[in-house]
Image (spheres, coloured by chain):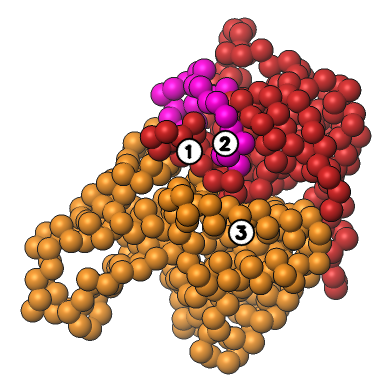
Amino acid sequence: MRTISVKDITKKVRDLCISAAYDLEPDVAGAIRAARDSEASPLGKEVLGQIIDNFEIAGRESVPMCQDTGIAVFFIEVGRDVFLDGSIEDAVNEGVRQGYKDGFLRKSVCHPIKRINTGDNTPAIIHTSIVEGDKVKIKIAPKGAGSENMSRLKMLKPAEGIPGIKSFVVESIKEAGGNPCPPIVVGVGIGGSFEKSAILAKTALLRSVGSKNPDSDVAALEGELLTLVNNLGIGPMGFGGTTTALAVHVETYPCHIASLPVALNIQCHADRHKEAVI
Amino acid sequence: MTEPKRITAPLTDADTAKLKAGDKVLITGVLYTARDAAHKRLIELLDRGEKLPFDIKGQIIYYVGPTPPKPGQVIGSAGPTTSGRMDAYTPRLLDLGLKGMVGKGARNREVLDSIKKNRAVYMAAVGGAAALIARSIKKAEIIAYGDLGPEAVRRLEVVDFPAIVVNDAEGGDLFLQGVEKYRRGA
């Protein structure tokens, strides 16, 4: 048994909130630079150039790359040999409170009906799981609303199959147009149950941009979906172009014989994700 | 790429007449900020027959909720938010003389018709380019609804604020034209 103080979790979460807002991860930055080189539209190329200038300024000057610093979403893996000396949820929320204040990040969380801002960006969305080992792994993916609002979930009939999945993904992205700040990263969750498909779609976004699903059939579907999405012509910010998505990531899970849940989680180009291990 | 057109805000009909969908522009002058919550309050004021907190004639509204400024900064990061959330409120403001809007994403049919009718213009800034855009903002002051925090109405003074014309006064639409040009396959 290894004891981990929840104070250390708070400190780590605070730092992750700030660094996620300021420093774009190299996988995303690399994918955007490659897109600028390959983009056919001159205006699209220019938009991608502004996006690159922007994340470079943000990293250099330690300021948020986007004003929508998001609702803070966490995936936390707790080793089963870890003893925590307090509430992990309280510790994470305290870290968010400190990080959003100390990092000068925008507080964007409110009551869903009364629409009153909570003032400190809490509560966070926290997914925890128990894994082997004696460590705690914290992944943060702060999520802006522009892209989250364009996300969709549909319970398909099994008979709709792969064509149904493709048409749902492509039509949803077409409808979203320039709203989710393309170039986007597309997370698709296929299978499981209603809520499982949504979590799969979200975790698909945590993968390194452009990485392939280890199942070759699923990887092939990712490739086909990427081509279909980029054929839409939406382009950077919806102004027209050949880069609508940087990548499509698909995750699957077995489902009921009568079901085919498909969830689509759209991520903007400010694809902020960081992780730390304690 | 062509050189950007320079415009000065507030705008006149003569200014909007010169702008075409797809034009790059650099805006200098005054912008007012407002998002959903502020728009809701502005419309409630009008419903009660009261005056808006600023003279809207010729003005440009920028849809933005900035991050808090760090010490020494005029404003924090300040990129555009999704304009479609303001669609329900926009035609009424255009009828009162609002001349321009800056945001991101598409507008609905009612807004597009109202833009044409009122000889206005809808422009997009690059979503997510919030640190870059903030450099063009030289002054910021809250003029209404301070309790809304990031959603308060601010008066911004900008120099060479970068945007792209999406919907012009003649009905031109960059989203339709641009996507049509690069769409492939079925």
User: Badge 1, how many Cα within 10 Å: few under 14, some, many 20+?
Assistant: many
**Who's orange, chain-wise?**
A
Q: Chain of mark 2?
A: B
Mark 3 crowdedness (10 Å alpha carbons): few <14, some 14-19, many ≥20: some
Residue type (three-letter) at the residue carrying disc 3: Ile
Please state, as top left, top right, bottom left or bottom right, where the N terminus of chain A lies in the image.
bottom left
Residue occupied by mark 3: A52
Comparing A195 with B82, the one in front is B82
Question: Looking at the picture, which amino acid does disc 2 mark?
Answer: Val
Secondary structure under tag 3 reads helix
Residue at 51 percent of width and 78 percent of height = A251
Which residue appears at 22% of the width and 71% of the height? A278
Question: Residue A250, image x and y in percent?
Answer: 55, 77
Question: Which mark is first along the chain, 2 or 1?
Answer: 2
In the image, the segment drawn in magenta is: B133-155
**Chain coloured red in this rendering:** B
Task: Find the distance from the CA under tag 1 to the CA under tag 2.
Answer: 11 Å
Q: Chain of mark 1?
A: B
Location of mark 2 (residue): B64
Please name whichever residue, A218 or A38, is drawn nearer the observer in this view of the structure.
A38
Which residue was labeled with disc 1?
B76
Q: Do the residues marked 3 and 1 share a common chain?
A: no
Q: Position of residue A237 (x, y in %)?
A: 70, 54
